[in-house]
Structure formats: C-alpha cells, structure tokens
Amino acid sequence: YGKDGYNLWLQYAKIESPELVDAYRKNTHKITLPQNSSTTNIIKNELTKAFKGMLLTSPEFSEKNIENHNLVIGTRDNFPWLIELVDKKQLDSLGQEGFIIKSTFFKDQPITVITGNSDLALLYGTFEFLKLIQTHKSISDLNITSIPKTKIRVLNHWDNLDRSVERGYAGSSIWNWHLLPDHIDQQYLDYARANASIGINGTVLTNVNANALVLTPSYLKKAAALAEVFRPYGIKVYLTARFSAPIEIGNLKTADPLDKNVQKWWKEKAEEIYSYIPNFGGFLVKADSEGQPGPHNYGRTQADGANLLAQALKPFGGIVMWRAFVYSEDTPDDRAKQAYNEFKPLDGKFDNNVLVQVKNGPIDFQPREPVHPLFGAMPQTPLMMEFQITQEYLGQGTHLVYLSKLYEEILSTDINAKGPGSTVAKIIDGSLENHPLSGMAGVSNIGTARNWTGNHFGQANWYAFGKLAWNPYEKSEKIAKDWIEMTFSSDPQFINTSLDIMMESHEAVVNYMTPLGLHHIMDWNHHYGPGPWVTDKHRDDWTSTYYHQAGADGIGFDRTSSGSNALSQYSSTIQNQFTNLKTCPEKYLLWFHHLPWSYQMQSGKTLWEELAFRYQKGVDQTTQALQQWSTLEGKIDDERYKHILSFLKIQEKEAKWWKNACLLYFQQFSKSPLPQGVDDPKKTLEDY
Ligand code: GCW
C-alpha cells in the first residue's frame, strides 16, 4: 500500500503507538455528518479510509444524532446550535472556504466540531483534522481557524491535446482526451482529492502555448466531464485561450481586440463554454510571447487584449489570468526589463475581473532570481504569482530540490513598495492594496508516472505550493516536516534527516548550477545540463553568453545605470541596496553587476576563487545528501528508498558535470588555476 507513491501525502499509515490510537479512537469513533451533497459524501469516504488505515477502526456515522457522539462536522444550517459555540462574527469571517476546528462540549460531553459556511469548507477542515492525526498531534484541545489568504489557487498544466506535456518530466498528460468524456479515469478523482487536501481550487487544463481546438464543442464536452468530477472537490476548470482563436476556429479574418466581430465572437464563445461548464473559471492567456499571437499583432496593448476576454466572461463571473511573460526579440532592451516596461504603464487599465500573472523573477524560473520588478509596481492591478513546480531549470525529473524554499524566499521579500513590510506575500494576497481578487498559480509537475511527479520529492513541491497558496506566510520547514511524516514515516531520525536534505537542497542546486547570481547558462533548448558556451542562436536572449557576459575583464550582467539599468525598475530602497556593492547580497551579485575576476568577495577570496568554491560546495552538498539518505535504509519501504537513492546518485553525478563544465568554461577567461579545495575536473572543456 502506497509503496509506489501513488497515495502521495494521504498514506494514512497505521499508527503504532497504542496510547495514541486509543486517544484518537476516543475522539473519533462516533461521527455526526449530514449527508446532503456529494462533498459530504466525499468527507465520509475520506474519514472511513483514514481511520481504517491509521486506527484500524470503522467509525459509526449519524446524520443528525449528536448525543454520545464525539466528532461533529457541519455548517450552522445543519446545526443551528453551533452559533452558541462559535460566535456569528467569527463564522461570517470564514467566507466560503475557511473553517474552524474546535474542541468543546455538547451537553457536558466533550466533542470536536469542524464547521464552516459551505460543504467545501467542511472538506478542507476534515483534511486539516486528518493531518493532525497523520502527524501524531494531540486532538483533544483544538481551536483552529483557517481562512485562505488568496482566492485563486490554481495549477497550470502545460499539457497539450496530444498528451505531451511541455517541460513535463513525469510521463504524459493525465488528461486522456481520447477517452473523455465517456470514460472517467479513477486518477481524475484522485487528482481532485489530492488537490482539495491542500486547498487548491482551480486547474488550468491546457498549455499556455495554446491550441484553439480546446475551445471547440468536442473538446468542451471533454473539459465539462472533468469539471463535473472536480466540482464536489471545489476545483474549477480553466482553459487557455489562444488569442487568434477567432481566426483559427471562428472563420474571422482578424483577432483584433477592438474589432466588433471579434468581441462578439468571444462573447458567444463564453456563452457556449458556460453552457457546457456552468462553473467554468475563466481563461489563462500567454500572448505576444515566444511566438504566441496577441494584441501586438494589431498594434493594441496587453490591456486591450485582456479586457476583450474579460468582458466576454464577466456576465458569467469568469476571470482572466493574463500573463506578464511578454518579451520580444525585436526589443533591444534587456529581457529582464521588458515585462515591466510593457505592463507598468497599463496599471489601472485592466477590467476588474483580470489578474496579471507574473513569474517570480524577471527572466524565467531560474534556480535563483531576484524578485520580479512588477511586484509593487502596479498597485491598481491584482497581481497573481506564477511559480514553476515542474523543475525545468532545476534538474528536471531527477534532482531533489525542495522548491518551497525558493517560493518562500520570494514571498517574504520586502519590496518596500509602501514602506518597509511590503512583502510580496502582501501583494499577491491582495492585502497591500485591498484587492478583492488574488491568487497564486503553479506550473504543474504532474504526469502519468505511478507516483505522479516522477521524483518522489516532487510531490513535496506540489504539496508546498498548495500550502503557500492558501497561506503565503507559512514556513517551508513546517510544511516539509508535515509532508515527510504524512508521506513516509513518523520515525524522528527519518524526519530529521529528510528534513535536513530538503532544507539544504535549494541552496545546493543554486551552488552547482548558477551561484552568485549567474543565470540562464543551461544547455540549449532542452534546458538540461550546463551550457555556458551556448551562443549564436537566432536570438541573443536565448543564449548563455548574453547573460553571463564572461570575458577577460570579468563576469556578470551589468544592470546598474552603467549597464541596462534594470535596477531602476525597483523601489529606491532595493535599488540602493543592490546598486551598492557593499550591500548587494552576494546571491544576486552577478545578476546586477559585471565584476573583474580579481574582485574581492566578503570571504576575502577573489571572485574567481569564490565562484569555484561555490560550485564545489554544491557538489559536496549533493554528496552529503546521498550519504544522509543512505543512513535511512530500512526506515521506509525498500521501493521508495531505492528509487530516491538512485536519483540522488544521478544528482551527485550531474552536480559534478555542472561544476566541471562551468568552471572549465569560465577558466578560459579568468585564466587562473582552481583554488585548493576544489576538485580537479580531470577533463577538458572539449569533453563537455
Ligand atoms: O520557461 C519557458 C519555457 C517554455 C514556456 C515558457 C512560458 C510554456 O521554456 O517552454 O512555454 O517559459 O512560460 O510561457
């Protein structure tokens, strides 16, 4: 059971301690739960499954009876007496998704209540309650209130209609378009359940490099079947809208957003979609980027484009998530500046059902980037965060990298937009500017792999994304700890060792791939492995040499006023901090500065030596992770243990590959020997 990882963090492994089992049984064996929707039915099944697995019991359910019961799950409509227990104000503040879990008394008898204002809230509360048991916490004195901080918490699948997945490393797309709508695969239900367990409430089924066919009736029927499966789990379906769809599937001559016929076409299209999918969420759009059509084709702005779709969806309550990932080879400006230049002047011009979806950094999901300058620069527009869960630039399917650390680093960044304390988290949860719409998107790492994500630890990134979308202030360490215990084992040595490996893993990948602010030096196109030598592609901003600028005089991209001046796009506090070499964090040094090889670092070493040491450190960290993991043999099932072990071996090998290739390449310019303590590659650059 669960050995292949299919059950994710919902393993519900048997609890060994008799005292714990006893305590849990006492508090859960008689459950009151009204059965009035498919969602409450899901709750019942989940509790049954969980208690069977963890406590070897089958609880007794009743719809109404509370006398002698110990777990009561319902809304105040179900149980009007709840209002005496939890005050009305508090209940109202929960909205439709928040929940309360409270230990209390009913006629002198101890009970636990899970309540909220919708059945979905009860489901969320149930998963939270089960998590407490999965992580062996006491459940006898609870008083938990949890309300999601963001409204839209979505996965973005870059899944194509032929079931290939762009930048996907876990098999094929789980959407079997061929068999839909007639065949509903069990995996769709399991997918919905897993997402609901971490509060994800939306899914964009299709790739942002979009195919207009998905908006035709035959595909809408298929998407509708999925939407129907997901509905009781609180998950809405969204689709990607190809901007040229009116031409491609609508027989129009233009897709100009200001053309009346185009507007009419999208209005009718929206109406048609809602006739198939009554709770359709809306559109996600990539326009004017990497060959995708967009408003630029007609001399129109990104706001014209977004509003065209927003107006079509508005009567039905749908939203548009319009991506800010717009950059062009025709613009001579630094790619890192283009999105800001394009979007900042449009602040205030977007309709109120549009969110602008911004990647965490200004280039493209690199192992480490400084925060995107648009955060804080568009106060009148709700900005949505786009994180990548799939590891396009971070070792793809094989490397163990706990991405929550990367997410947390960005979310907790104080961009000082409205004085100190203006963190990115406050922008994306809408609290800084009081935006009613808010959200977070994660580019999915899910596929047909038996364990969903290929790498077992990829599951942690899916899990952490959901948790941070719900609460962008949560700490990575706590998330990881829960995840490990729910997924693998409660053995303290196992938890601590895995936690160490996870918490160290992001810094490790940055060290062996792109230390000190280097970026975009991976190999051409597939983005796997090192490629600092990549040059001469048909556009400069797709090469590596454009970004690292290594030469005899030094290394790094000058983004100060003597260079591209991308720094001018940040708040003055950040600008000053990053411009000044004394205060610029070394982790961003070569992102913003071009410096001589002999530049003296904080450690006293030269830049060249420090760079070499960082690469070595990255390798050493992977070696250590491998050693740590091997101490865990026998602590979990052999199948997952060995799978992870073999991936860690690959990671160590590839960390060396990165280090050797990059150092040999940069050494041509630094013309200095590798410092002592850095392993000799025993190869030449030609070998790579
Ligand atoms: O990261 C880059 C990827 C493309 C992707 C693009 C985007 C979907 O290399 O594969 O296209 O970003 O985010 O639109």
Image (tube, grey):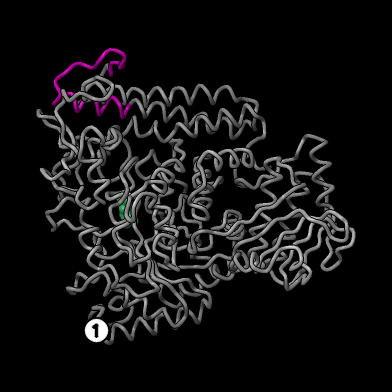
Rendered position, 400 above or below 333? above
Looking at the rendered image, the quarter that the N terminus falls into is top right
Residue 685 or residue 553, whichever sits in front: 553
Rendered position, 220 above or below 509? below
Place residue 593 in its image quadrant. top left
Residue at 77% over, 35% down? 16
Looking at the rendered image, the quarter that the C terminus falls into is top left
Q: Secondary structure at mark 1?
A: loop
The residue indicated by pointer 1 is 259
| Residue 97 counted in the magenta span | no
Residue 479 or residue 285, whichever sits in front: 479
Residue at 58% over, 38% down? 481
Residue at 22% over, 43% down? 576
Give the image location of residue 41, x and y in percent.
72, 65
Camera sees residue 539: yes
Label 1 beta carbon within 8 A of ligand 1: no
Q: Is residue 262 left or right of residue 83?
A: left
**Residues drawn in magenta:** 657-681
Rendered position, 394 above or below 84? above
Q: Is residue 331 left or right of residue 151?
A: left
| Residue 667 counted in the magenta span | yes
Circle 1 crowding by C-alpha within 10 Å: few under 14, some 14–19, many from 20: few
Give the image location of residue 196, x and y in percent.
59, 58
Place residue 197 in its image quadrant. bottom right
Kindly identify the amino acid type of the residue bearing the numbered disc 1.
Asp
Seen from this angle, which residue lies furthest front?
Answer: 419
